Amino acid sequence: MEQSKKRSWAEPFKIKVVELLKMTTPEERQKALLEAGYNTFLLRSDDVYIDLLTDSGTNAMSDYQWAGMMLGDEAYAGSKNFYNLEHNVQKYYGYKYLVPTHQGRGAEHIISKILIKPGHYIPGNMYFTTTRLHQELAGGTFVDVIIDEAHDPESTHPFKGNVDLQKYEDLIKKVGPKNIPYITVALTVNMAGGQPVSVENLKQVHEMSKKHGIRVVLDATRAIENAYFVKTREKGYENKSIADILHELCSYSNACTMSGKKDLLVNIGGFLALNESEVFEEARNMVVVYEGLHTYGGLAGRDMEAMSRGIEEAVQEAHIRARIGQVEYVGERLTELGIPIVHPTGGHAIFLNAKKFLPHLKQIEFPAQTLAAELYLESGIRSMERGIVSAGRDKQTGDHYFPKLELVRLTFPRRVYTQAHCDVTTEAVESVFNRKDKIKGLKMVYEPKYLRFFQARFDKLS
Ligand SMILES: *Cc1c(COP(=O)(O)O)cnc(C)c1O
């Protein structure tokens, strides 16, 4: 018998402990949605069936990691779990020095405070909320130097996270290399939908930076997912291991900040890793002020052990293939159904294009917010708005920003949901799609002053 062309694959784990999900009725969901003011951030997790709000800290740990939790050495100083973590960061990421932090933003805070002086410019491949904020709080100005394709939902560029070398060079010429302490390169780019950076591009960024005496600081939060895209999309890397690619990516940088809550399969944790001894000395002093002693950085010994073991599991080929494979699977199903999504799909999320999904709604009727609410109502699935509500208002004029992209993000926690949950998700999106013409928009009835998307409330337009 001829073998079928496409071979199925399955999650590379079996399930030892389960957490029961609550199934709700449409009436219960309608009530919960009203109480939440049509904002999925204001839903109680208890009322959610499949939670695709974020992949941050929502990972399922393995038995190996849980066993490590029992081996937590809770000594105030010199915990053995710190040394295990240090060993694995050196081995897999390749940096010399490690400063643990409670999560990614703790590392961003420290590196920004050490390297940025008022008046400095920090280029980066698209902003991330906490990264940019810490740079600004230190007196710096963030400058976006990502390629234009990153802002175009129709572009199928394989490395939409790449730095535009011309934009970078123009900035160096304009403000002078002395005013640029470092460039941040995020692997992958969260705000562009988990889009990767190629090794070739990072190498060029490294060379240009070195020429001008500018450091390269990676946001390595999803660098392992980035390595998978390099392996599958970049010539010459097909036969390299994820671990080798990760090592090579980091070799083109001076330091990295890390949120372990993403790639590293834990619920809390992060670190700053670097190669320069003087900067390390300063970071080691500063972490004591803001996070905790330099051998725990705001984490329990058991948390460091779980993260250290998470590194070993995260670089395994079967894991990363299934992790990103799950996102690709949902992307393919939705595309087959003719549902508008952003292509190519990224590492951690699918983005529904709400402008195309609900073309009869004006942007001021909050199409993405509406779609996220309707998806919850349909199925109990929780997603997140990334559009006009998230974009906020112009500080000068007080008007809404009208972003080009009006998207709903379906973000996949690692090792939490099965392919069957993915099927239920695509079917729910399809059901909403089939009744899209009847869907009415929303009006905002409460607007908080800062980061309004978290707490804004809405009403249905009649
Ligand atoms: C989540 C995230 C951070 C911040 O990390 P926290 O652990 O949430 O503090 C920084 N950069 C990127 C790309 C992230 O996704």
Image: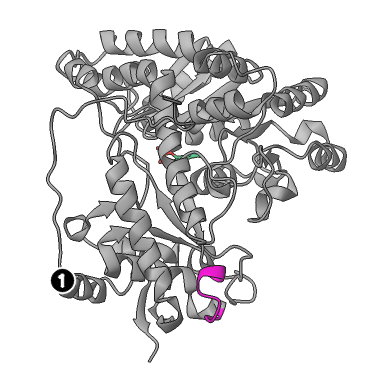
Q: Quadrant of the C terminus?
A: bottom left
| Residue 315 can be seen, yes or no | no
**How far from the left and from the top, in percent, is residue 179?**
76, 36
Between 117 and 445, the residue placed more toward the observer is 445
| Residue at image mark 1 | 28
In the rendered structure, the answer to whether residue 187 lies left or right of residue 148 reads: left
Between 39 and 336, the residue placed more toward the observer is 336
Q: What's under tag 1, amino acid-wise?
A: Glu
The magenta stretch is 355-362
Q: Quadrant of the N terminus?
A: top left
Residue located at (57% from left, 41% from top): 189
Image quadrant of ligand 1 equals top left
**Magenta residue check for 361:** yes
In the rendered structure, the answer to whether residue 412 lies left or right of residue 215 reads: left
**How far from the left and from the top, in percent, is residue 253?**
64, 21
Q: How is the image coloured?
A: one colour
| Residue 116 can be seen, yes or no | yes
**Magenta residue check for 267:** no
In the rendered structure, the answer to whether residue 254 lies left or right of residue 55 reads: right
Residue located at (47% from left, 8% from top): 91
Most common secondary structure along the magenta stretch? loop
Q: With respect to residue 331, does 66 lie above or below?
A: above
Q: Secondary structure at mark 1?
A: helix
Q: Which residue reaches farthest right?
A: 173
